[in-house]
Amino acid sequence: MGRLPDGRDLIAAIVAFCRQAGVHTAAFSVMGTVSEYTLGAFDPDQQVHVTENENAPFDIAACRGNVSRKAGALFVRAYVCLTDIHGRVVAGRLFSPTRLREAEIDMLEITAPVFDRRYDSSLGLDLWPQRPPTGVANGEEPRTAGSNESK
Amino acid sequence: MGRLPDGRDLIAAIVAFCRQAGVHTAAFSVMGTVSEYTLGAFDPDQQVHVTENENAPFDIAACRGNVSRKAGALFVRAYVCLTDIHGRVVAGRLFSPTRLREAEIDMLEITAPVFDRRYDSSLGLDLWPQRPPTGVANGEEPRTAGSNESK
Amino acid sequence: MGRLPDGRDLIAAIVAFCRQAGVHTAAFSVMGTVSEYTLGAFDPDQQVHVTENENAPFDIAACRGNVSRKAGALFVRAYVCLTDIHGRVVAGRLFSPTRLREAEIDMLEITAPVFDRRYDSSLGLDLWPQRPPTGVANGEEPRTAGSNESK
């Protein structure tokens, strides 16, 4: 659990948080406020995300995602619900730029083997391979990815 | 953490995921895309869920729920926020059929004693008994319910 | 994981849940139904939350937050998405009074050092200090804050 840097792009901030904590696989939630968002919804016909960008203050009413790897790099897939003082609610997949005013994250590291995303051309998305769950392996206790900790 | 089977009903997929991982009590989040949804909102006057079904592509902007038992079987209670390329946001309690295009789940197993749901006729819902928290028992470390793990 | 007391204010119920379980730092999710809500969105110009209160039945489609300390007391920061039988979706930061009909919580305790909130006059919010993550400290396994457990 910790605070993300003010003014950063949300995806970049999550990637930096993982790098600093040495985390490569994790599930997380974020809450806070943003000054700009870019959200998308998937169009299965065109196999693209239709995105919307807006420069305005919003509260992050919900943001949940995971971190895994794609082509050797950390990859964030996350979805967000936003709201503003006019009662508007917008939601969708998180894209950049989404600029934080301030935000707090809680993250649970998964110490399982690496999850690798690859482009699935039939679904049009970067996905993990489909395999049945193998049960809960020994020694795979979750760790909390820490921040704001006085050593 | 893992990927749920493409094309499955979401509740059925979560139950199957738990069975395969040997999990009977858990909290989880799901994200992904659906081709059909059934969501409900509770009407306290009639003590029924008013449901809405729609066959159309939506992104799962948020989905959080838990798994416990009811009458000896695994029971999923979950809530969902969906959005589409037209900017619509719909939300409510998850019902079947809700058909996945593809989805990813992260689940935290609760190794506490079984939570049993029973119908509460005054509230009109299947609920756990109300008891004060008993603190954190020893040996109740959470386990991550694994998937996509190369043994 | 556990059930919160029927009819209570949601923030008060979370604080009581933490006190009873001896938890001072945690991340949590709540789902259930409410009979009244108070939600706010932050106005960065005035540095206040613009709140909306309504007495009506809603389902909690998403609620995620954390518990930390402010001035020695437990402090809840949480965000909520609500929906009703008319298909309305409202979202925002959780304030009191928000009255539960019934609700279920899952909570993950963070056993890191105390997170202390202080008022940040430039951002207008009660926030934790900004520090880089220090990695995952030893012995900081998460505990589940238990409830509904037969001793």
Image (spheres, coloured by chain):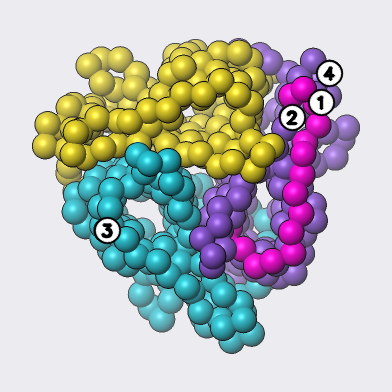
Chain colours: A cyan, B purple, C yellow
Q: Secondary structure at mark 2?
A: strand
> In the displayed image of the protein, which residue is found farthest to the right?
B71
Mark 4 or mark 2, earlier in chain = 2
> Chain letter of disc 2?
B
Q: Mark 1 sits on what residue?
A: B46
Rounded to the nearest angstrom, the CA distance separating label 2 from label 1 is 6 Å
The residue sitting at the left extreme is C122
Quadrant position of residue B151:
bottom right
Q: Which residue is mark 3?
A: A55
Q: From the image, which quarter does the N terminus of chain C lie in?
A: top right
> How far apart are the alpha carbons under marks 1 and 4?
12 Å
Measured in 3D between alpha carbons, the distance from the residue under mark 4 to the one under mark 3, in whole angstroms, is 48 Å
**Residue shown at the point (28%, 53%) measured from the top left:** A56
Q: Position of residue A149 (x, y in %)?
A: 23, 38
- Look at 55% across and 57% down and name the residue there: B88
Local crowd size for mark 4, using a 10 Å CA cut-off: few (<14), some (14–19), many (≥20)? few
Tell me if I can see residue A37 in this picture. Answer: yes
Give the residue at x 52% y 82%: A119
Give the residue number, with chain letter if any, for mark 2. Answer: B43
Foreground: disc 1 or disc 4: 1
Name the spot of residue C90 as percent of width and height, x first.
Answer: 51, 39
Q: Which residue is mark 4?
A: B121
Same chain for the residues under marks 3 and 2 in the image: no
Q: Are marks 2 and 1 in contact (CB under 8 Å)?
A: yes
Q: Amino acid at mark 3?
A: Asn
At mark 3, the secondary structure is loop
**Disc 2 marks which amino acid?**
Asp
Q: Earlier in the sequence, mark 1 or mark 4?
A: 1
Q: Name the amino acid, label 4.
A: Ser
Q: Which residues are magenta?
A: B43-60
Q: Predominant secondary structure in magenta?
A: strand
